[in-house]
Structures are given as structure tokens and as C-alpha cells.
Image (tube, rainbow, N blue to C red):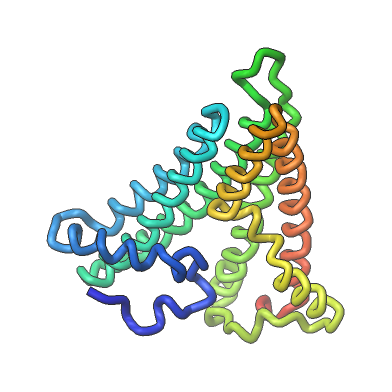
Amino acid sequence: MVHPAGVKDRRSGEHWAGRLYMREISLRVDRHLVNTRVTPNQLTYVMTLAGVLAAPALLVPGITGALLGVLMVQLYLLLDCVDGEVARWKQQFSIGGVYLDRVGAYLCDAAVLVGFGLRAADPWGEGSVDWLWAFLGTLAALGAVLIKAETDLVGVARHQQGLPPVKESAAEPRSSGVAVARKAASALQFHRLILGIEASLVILLLAILDLIKGDLYFSRLGVAVLAAIAMLQTLLHLVSILASSRLR
């Protein structure tokens, strides 16, 4: 069993972790599923559950919670690869499957950031819960969801106007200033920090630093930074869409 040509090489729609290692792991899982009655949509449901469970996992104090969060997100990523591969093998494609996959992506990103905010609020600590951090984590989650929605709504708007799907070239901004800003943001890749996979790894790193320092200073700093990135990226992404030809 091998991947179809081009699957691991595609840049849009394929996460770097998938290209780097998860597509190799997923093939070993596929061979145990393709001859069963398990459907791609059932796998997508489990994928979504794994992503959502990252939030309660992060509430476990210390390094253990951060590791559990990474584990849940990696399981999400694995199943995100497997459901599509099993669908291709069994020729079981559906619009519902595409929709469920998008819902899972929304929920995983949001769950990781909400869980991070709650973790920084220290609900199991000796003092009172500082809900500011929970609010900032939720704000970051809202931004992550809005960014995905901004992209998806381009397709909705075009469909309602009877226009064909947007071409890749249409994403280029018509303004030279916006184009430069977009290229700079793309080069820095800071926006990826609010995606569930990257965020879970950042949370683990911050948990290690917290362990060394003996408090939640680094986690709380991380929550504030991710909330700021999410709000800024939400605005920049909207401007980028409006300045491009995607809505024309």
C-alpha cells in the first residue's frame, strides 16, 4: 500500500507533520482497516473526538498534561491522514466526509487553545482561579476558528454568486503593499502557532520551562502571545482576502 503520486508533495492542504512522518505511520494503520467494516466517516468522528479531548488533557497539571495534549493532537493528525486514505482505498467519498473533516479541524484548534487558557488559569492551584488566562485562551481559539471561517466563506460566497472555485493565483493581493506584508507573514510562519498541532508543541515546551521556573509564568506569557497573534492574524487574513481577487 502506497500513497497516490503527489499526496505527500502538496503544499496546500497537507500539514508539514504529515509530509515529515505521519503519512508513513498512517499507511501501517490503513492496512488493518481497509478490510474491515470501519467507514471513513467513523474514523473522522474518532479523529474529532481525539482533537476535542486535547482540552481536558491539558488540564492535567505539569508535564503530564502537556504530554497528553500532544498525544491527543497527534492521534487527531494520524486519523486525519487515515480517514482520507481509507476513503480512497474503499472508494467511499462523500460531501459529508469533507464537511466533518473541516468541523474536526475547527474543533481541534479551538480545543487546544481553550485548554491552554484553562491550564494557565490554574484551576487546580491553591489560590483562586485567574480567569483572565482562560479568557485569553478562548480569544485565541476564536481567532483560530475565524481565520478558518474566513477562508471557507470565500468558497461559500463564490458558490452563492454562481462562480467557480477560486484558483490559487487569485490569492495574490492586488496591492503591492499588502503583497509584501503577506509574503513577510508567510516567511515568518508565526500564524501557524495558533494551529492545534503547533500550539500543542509550544505548550509542551512552555510546560518544561514552567517546571524549571516553578510556576506558570511561561504558560501565561504564551497564552497572551497566542491571543495577540490570533487577533492580529484574523484581521490580516481578512484584509488579504479582500485585497485579492478571490471574491471577484
Task: Using the image, determine if residue 106 lies above or below residue 127.
Answer: below
Q: Is residue 19 left or right of residue 97?
A: right
Task: Using the image, determine if residue 134 lies above or below residue 153.
Answer: above
Residue 222 on image: x %, y %: 72, 43
Residue at horizontal 54 percent and vertical 42 percent from the top = 111
In which quarter of the view is residue 114 placed?
A: top right
Q: Quadrant of the C terminus?
A: bottom right
Residue 157 on image: x %, y %: 60, 69
Using the image as rendered, state which of residue 137 and residue 188 is in the foreground: 188
Task: Using the image, determine if residue 116 lies above or below residue 128.
Answer: below
Residue 245 on image: x %, y %: 70, 81
Using the image as rendered, state which of residue 187 and residue 211 is in the foreground: 211
Residue at horizontal 51 percent and vertical 47 percent from the top = 107
Determine if residue 241 is in view.
Answer: no
Q: Is residue 35 left or right of residue 44?
A: left
Q: Is residue 59 left or right of residue 144?
A: left
Q: Quadrant of the N terminus?
A: bottom left
Task: Using the image, determine if residue 153 lies above or below residue 113.
Answer: below
Determine if residue 210 is in view.
Answer: yes
